Image (tube, rainbow, N blue to C red):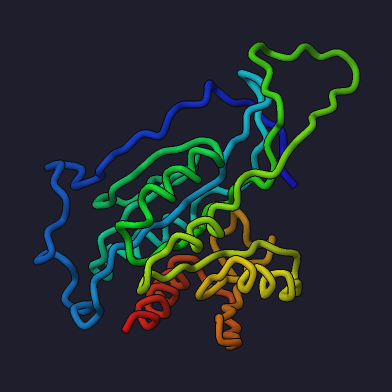
Amino acid sequence: MHQLAGVSKVNQPRHFVLGNALTGERPRAAERPARFSQMALHRVLITVGPTREPIDPVRYIGNRSSGRMGQALAQAALDAGHSVTLIVGPVQFVMPPGVRRIDIETAAQMYDAVLDEFPSHDLLMMAAAVADYRPIRVSPTKLAREGVLTIECEPTPDIIAAAAKMRRPGQRIIGFSLESSGNLDRAREKLVRKNLDLIVFNPIQTMNSAQIEPTLLWRDGREEIVPIQGKEQFAKMLLKRASAMFP
């Protein structure tokens, strides 16, 4: 369920490269931690945070995603020596230095950014909480408070399914399925229908939390129940599982 909130004018995606806070430099390969030298280096594309779907110039449909999981994945990927691009919605958390960052606000902007970027990456980790619906009509002026307001919505584009349709041999895709507790069947259905390599079943109780109690569902039918743990710890584990998917 998405909540109504305030919004400023929707901006076009903005591109940044985040580096050392003092020097402005990006980390060189020689500076990467030696303990990860045995892992193959990949180009990792991660989506982070919520999207906002405007109702009028002030209000939007959004959700409570903080971006904490995406932040943890970005840091884990950097620590493993991978090259990281983030596509970031409006988030509460500061993203780590050393990543290439593209800021977006709406699901349509994230759709365009993912399809533009994915061809040049090896792994897509779709950790963003993309709005499922958007208003069909966006008012150009602030709506006055006058009785009952009915907002007709339409589905937003399915970003990860579109990416899966265009992927080249050798690319891998990991999705996240935020569901009510125990609803693994819906996550399994998404895994197959969207042609993913792995999906993380993620109970809604973990949204905006520092911890996660996930279940990993694999394309070949394997399941891995992961004990509740911090998102930073889980991100490191998930990056190792992702690396193992590459030959």
Residue 178 in the image: above or below residue 108: below
- Tell whether 182 sits left or right of 166: right
- Tell whether 2 sits left or right of 150: left
| The C terminus sits in image quarter | bottom left
Residue 85 placed where, x, y %? 33, 53
Residue 115 placed where, x, y %? 43, 50
- Tell whether 130 sits left or right of 14: right
Front one among 237 and 42? 42
Front one among 167 and 221? 167
Q: Residue at image x 54%, y 52%?
A: 159
Q: Residue at image x 49%, y 54%?
A: 68
Front one among 191 and 130? 191
Q: Quadrant of residue 52?
A: top right
Residue 2 placed where, x, y %? 71, 43
Give the tally of numbered discs: 0
Q: Residue at image x 38%, y 47%?
A: 116
